[in-house]
Amino acid sequence: MQQVMNKNLEQRKIFLWGAVEEDNARVLVEQLCYLSAIDPVAPIHFYINSPGGMVTAGNAIHDMMQSLPAPVYTYCLGQAASMAATLLSAGEKGHRYIYPLAEVMIHQPSMGGFRARMWEIEIHARQIAKAKEMTARILAANCGTTVDRIKEDFDKDYWMDAQEAIAYGIVDRMAG
């Protein structure tokens, strides 16, 4: 398995498989930095099959993608939902791909179930509202649409097949 991972890195391929979490976000950020340092011009190919996950972990990946000199081409296999859809849309314009059977889903950020005092809930609610606004702005810029349209579509889980994701502007074209 290590040989496969090494070969993928040699070919400048990185993968998000599963939920966006602290551990895999750290690995992806490190891989992005490493590949960009080796060759700041050659594209990095970022393959995504994820149900989404932690906003802060996804933001770390997103910020690194945007700050590198190397272009990051994104590819959706299976699904890119929630935060993973935001990462998919953040790829290099003209090089955001989706495979024919893949699906994309956007929705507003959510807060996991927890026990807290009222003031803690109020703080979390403010943070979720900020995350919703920030995610809507990022998606609107990446998709070439308005923040209001994104917020309207955020009201529910908004699922798209490959063709619909292209029309929406999350990706540019079909892969494969």
Image (cartoon, grey):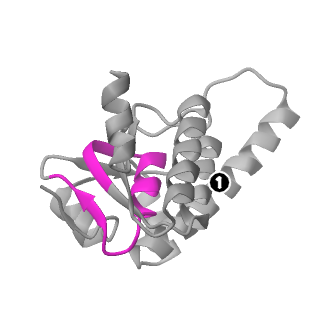
Left/right placement of residue 78 relative to residue 9 reads left
Q: Residue at x 48, y 62 (%)?
A: 39
Q: Is 173 in front, or is 46? A: 46
**Element type at mark 1:** helix
- The quadrant in which residue 94 appears is bottom left
Relative height, residue 40 to residue 155 (above, below): below
- Quadrant into which the C terminus falls: bottom left
Between 152 and 61, the one lying in front of the other is 61
Quarter of the image that includes the N terminus: top left
Q: Residue at x 74, y 20 (%)?
A: 115
> Relative to 37, is 100 on the left or the right?
left
Residue 63 higher or lower than 25, as above or below: below
Quarter of the image where one finds residue 54: top right
In x, y percent, where is residue 139? 48, 66
Q: Which residues fall within the magenta stretch?
A: 75-99
Q: Is residue 56 magenta?
A: no
Q: Is residue 14 visible?
A: no
Residue 24 visible here: yes
Task: Report the residue at 40% width, 69% height from top.
Answer: 92
Provide residue 55's location: percent of width, then percent of height: 60, 45
Neighbor class of circle 1 (other Cα within 10 Å; few <14, some 14-19, many 20+) is: some
